[in-house]
Amino acid sequence: MTSTSLMMIILVILPFYSWCATPTVAANLSPANIDGLKAQFQTAMKSFSDVASIHYTLAGIKELGVVPPDTYCNDIKKLVDKSDVESIFHATEAARALANCKLPAEEYRALLTSTLQSDKSTTAEVYYAVRASVNLGLNVDESRVEKRLNALAKTDDSVASQGYALLTGAQLSQPIAKFYADTINDLVQQADEVDGRTLQYEGGVGTTALLVNAFYEVAEKAGVPVKIDPKQLIKFASYFSTKRHVATLRSAYYLTKVFKYLSDRKNTIPVVVSRTTPAAVSAQNPSVFVSVSNLFGQPVGEIFVVAESAKRKEDGAVVISKQKLTAKDSTSSIFELPFYDAKIPRGFYTIHLTLTPRGDEKLIGLTDNTIEVKVTSEAALENAELNVADRDSTAQAKTHKLTYPNALSEKLDLHSHQKLIIKFQVKDKRTGEYVRTQQAFIRFTNKKSKKEIIYLAEAVSGATAQYKAEMDLTSNAADFRYQSGAYDLVVIVGDSLLQNAFEWKVNDNVQLTFHEDSLADKNHQDLYLPRPEIIHQFRVEEKRPPTIVSLVFSGLTLLPLLILLVSWLRLGFNLSGMPLGLSPLVFHASHGAAFALMFVYWKYLDMFQTIRYLALISIPLFLAGHRVLAILAARREKKV
Amino acid sequence: MSQIGEVAGILRKLYDEYRTTTPKKLKLIDAYLVYVMLTGIIQFAYCLLVGTFPFNSFLSGFISTVGCFVLAASLRIQLNKANRSTFNVTPERAFADFVFAHIILHLVVMNFIG
């Protein structure tokens, strides 16, 4: 195999294989929460506190098809701040949303002109001034604005600034708009990708919506289609469709505008596919209904939907392949897929749908749509029996056959040498096989205290899947806290793939008699009541002997000193040889001082001070001592 | 029985020889050594009696006696004229060392006594 063919294999087949093998992550879009946005605007319309809110609310609700009454014109005139270009912008935009609201243009002209001529205005201010001028019908010096935008592009390269530049471009002539429309792709590249599924800009939903809205506005003015890669447009749409509730009116307004642009037939439309029936498929709901619409919830024209595959989550088994869904209405927005079938076993399924438009609609998001359903079935409890057996010899079992939902009528009396066994099987009515369930318990409820004691029923492995739960009155007595008395016995069976769950009262008078005395129920501490006070325990001092003992021994320690003096005297200790003079005096004095220092150290000083004093004392000590010893040495020499 | 008599005889002989041959200076130091040893024994007995609580004080006192004993013993060795051949140190030097070592010993003991 030559290296080139090997390269071919690696470069062509491997990526192809990995693309096929990549699990397609469900990137379903969901329809926009139009009602929520409308409600948000309508609540805001009840009272306004600033002109920006008026702008966003009135313009927003107009986008959603509700024309606000002209009475708000007075509010606008009252709340506008004539010295702030942004305020003027909001006022003119709000006035535009009303049918008949004229603002005094002359009052604002001076400020708008000065903003456009100033070298200090930001891109946002330039946009506000230009748009307000256009709204008021004032002239705008386009070349000047263009020059200013170019200067700003060099100094401020933030995404928001670029967005405002685009919006300003959309207000100017078509060639300028076209220039800015060409920069859309650059701006899109600057978006942040999250999880490989959504694209957004720093600043949250308000900023992202403003920017995407800017793309469409400027492209519309330029007369060109918005050039965004479909994959990236889907990611933007994904981001917006996850925003079910937005906090500010500004975000709500721009989000509404974006949804409108993304649902406009002139533009590329992302398609929303969602399930309208509940997730559980059963004999009563045998079909899955799917709705196909745009982000606004409107139909997208004639379209064909095919279920490519339905894979079971447990084992990946594919149950249907390339099945067409039937359209239920003429507008092609609801489709049906029959799913309840003998060939489709119970389980959780992921259905992959592919859409094909009839015409050449500019639709995106046609592949990678998934629907999750679960196929459930009805179950029955069968072959249930209750055995009362002796602990030691299982031969003597008394068996009661039980039929759901009938309870056992007779009273059960159990003593400490017995055990209770319950057996049952759960059958899937559709397939007739015995299944295992997620929940299978038996529950004893103390009739007096209502305390519950629950035991797990375990299934033996194999096809029969017989469940068995056992309660032994000696080894399990501690669970009941040895409380003898009357108990209820209930069997509980449940599963997420079963349509019906069971809570079957088997017997309501089970007398349990335990051998030991009953213990009171544990008093679980109430967490929110005051706890017992903690009193600090100081460290207990170590025991010391009585003072007398230690004094006696101190005295005893001094006793040998007496013995020493006596024995020295006996031996002939005398001071006759002691030299007299300055040096001996100094020697003895400093020697004594050193020992006095020791005492003072013990009582008052610390090591550093002592060392200093010691150093001081040791100088005369050594000098004098040397002298004295020299004298003694000379004396000795003389003697010899 | 006779063994005890033998031991007593040996001890008496030892004592007599000690009295006659040992110079006075060394005998003085021996008395001092006995004194220090007695002090140490009493301290130890006290510790055994009442327990080791303040342990640092007990150690300090005991080590003081032990240290004094050792220093005095080394002074005695150095002053003993019979050892002149092994040690080449004058008695004055030995005494000076004795004093110096004692100062340091007492410094440590006082620090530790608490």
Image: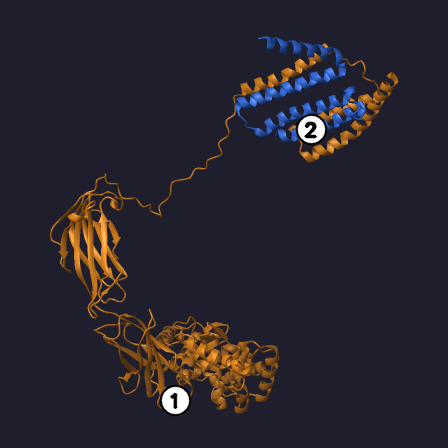
How far from the left and from the top, in percent, is residue A270?
40, 82
Q: Is residue A473 above or below residue A62?
A: above
How far from the left and from the top, in percent, is residue B18?
72, 13
The residues tagged by marks 1 and 2 sit, at their Cα atoms, a distance apart of: 104 Å
Tell me what residue is drawn at x 56 percent, y 23 percent. Answer: B47
Q: Secondary structure at mark 1?
A: loop
Q: Is residue A400 above or below residue A326?
A: above
The hue in which chain B appears in the rendered picture of the protein: blue
Q: Amino acid at mark 1?
A: Glu
Task: Characterize the local packing of mark 1: few (<14), some (14-19) or many (20 or more) Cα atoms within 10 angstroms.
Answer: some
Identify by letter the chain in orange. Answer: A
Residue located beneath label 1 in the image: A361
Q: Nearer the viewer, residue B18 or A429?
A: B18
Residue A452 falls left or right of residue B105: left
Residue A16 falls left or right of residue A600: left
How far from the left and from the top, in percent, is residue A509?
15, 49
Q: Nearer the viewer, residue A500 or A597?
A: A500
Residue located beneath label 2 in the image: B105
